[in-house]
Image: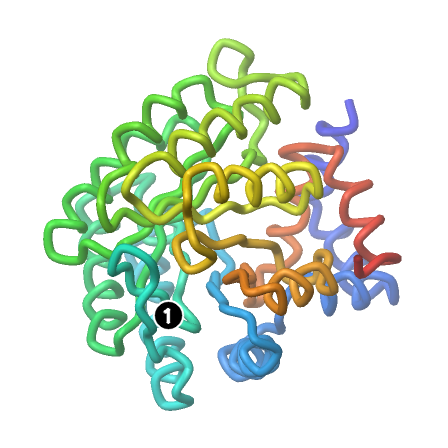
Amino acid sequence: MLRSVILAAARSQKVERLVETAPVSRDVVKRFVAGSGTGEALDATRQLADAGLCITLDNLGEDTLTADQANATKQAYLELLAALGQAGLTAPKEGGGGVTVATAEVSLKLSALGQAFDEQLAEKNAREICEAAAALGTTVTLDMEDHTTTDSTLDILSRLRRDHPGTGAVLQAYLRRTEGDCRELATAGSRVRLCKGAYKEPEHVAYQAPLEVDKSYVRCMNILMAGEGYPMLATHDPRLIAIAQDRARWFDRSPDEFEFQMLYGIRPEEQTRLARAGHTVRVYVPYGTEWYGYLMRRLAERPANLAFFGRALISKK
């Protein structure tokens, strides 16, 4: 029922206006979204880089329904990459296994580039962004969305990697298929972000109990750590972070052979602590004018996120 209420609110322009003008909303947006434009995203990126952190930037927007919208998203990413390059924030360094680890890269949702109505257009737009990123020495990661797009996203990833092998993948531990996908992608030079998953999925597709999701995350982590690729472990869970550090020792991985990833505004003190301990920590930084839809979808997909964001507002640890 809570999910239905949130979805109804997401579609209501009246509720949107109320939320956008409420003082508490400004606090939430400022904490979890790095502004509405390229300039603000660049400022946030500089601050994080100065603190010793790496960054991946997401231009908000998922419900793209026309070619014009898809092309506008592509242009926004090209503008962002040019700005990052001019600011010297795309300088690469060598990670373990020869993987390029850039200070700042970008994350793409193929749905924002036209995937829902024209997969070829989405791939073409993603390819142009990959080419622009490569020219600046940085990388692109393809975000994963609901399970109906998984095969399409992985197929596009495979084709993009023929020319841009550093293109990153995202796998979601709550999907029952993900252990197999981890085995397929745990290859030399393969950058793979492992997250728990945030979409509402049916039981036959995804684990439902938090404990089962955690167990799957650890199994998938073990596969990636044992493989030849570059694991990117997206979690704020202290238990999983500790397990990851233990697994790195078990599989004889040095701190430059994997990285942790966390959301902008979530546990910033822990992000800094891990970086100071020698780990690569990459912060996922969303920005753009569509913050209302972004936050509401995160809440609707898993209403437990409401408590998660609430805790983050009162704690930096």
Task: Residue 19: tell me if it is visible.
Answer: yes
Q: In this view, does 99 lie to the left or right of 36?
A: left
- Which residue, as the protein is rendered here, is positioned at the far bottom? 86
- In depth, the one of 161 and 257 nearer the eye is 257
- In depth, the one of 289 and 99 nearer the eye is 99
Question: In this rendering, is residue 124 above or below 103?
Answer: above
* Residue neighbourhood size for the residue with mark 1, other residues' Cα within 10 Å, grouped as few (<14), some (14–19), many (≥20): many
Q: Quadrant of the N terminus?
A: top right
Mark 1 — residue?
Answer: 102
Residue 179, image x and y in percent? 39, 23
Amino acid residing under circle 1: Ala
Which corner quadrant of the image does residue 126 belong to? bottom left
Rendered residue at 42%/36% (across/down) = 171
* Chosen colour scheme: rainbow
Q: How many marks?
A: 1
Rendered residue at 73%/54% (across/down) = 16
Q: Is residue 11 left or right of residue 154?
A: right
Task: Residue 11: tell me if it is visible.
Answer: no
Residue 61, image x and y in percent? 48, 55
Q: Is mark 1 on a helix, strand or loop?
A: strand
Question: In this rendering, is residue 187 above or below 223?
Answer: below
Rendered residue at 57%/40% (across/down) = 246
Question: In this rendering, is residue 75 above or below 14?
Answer: below
Rendered residue at 40%/76% (across/down) = 80
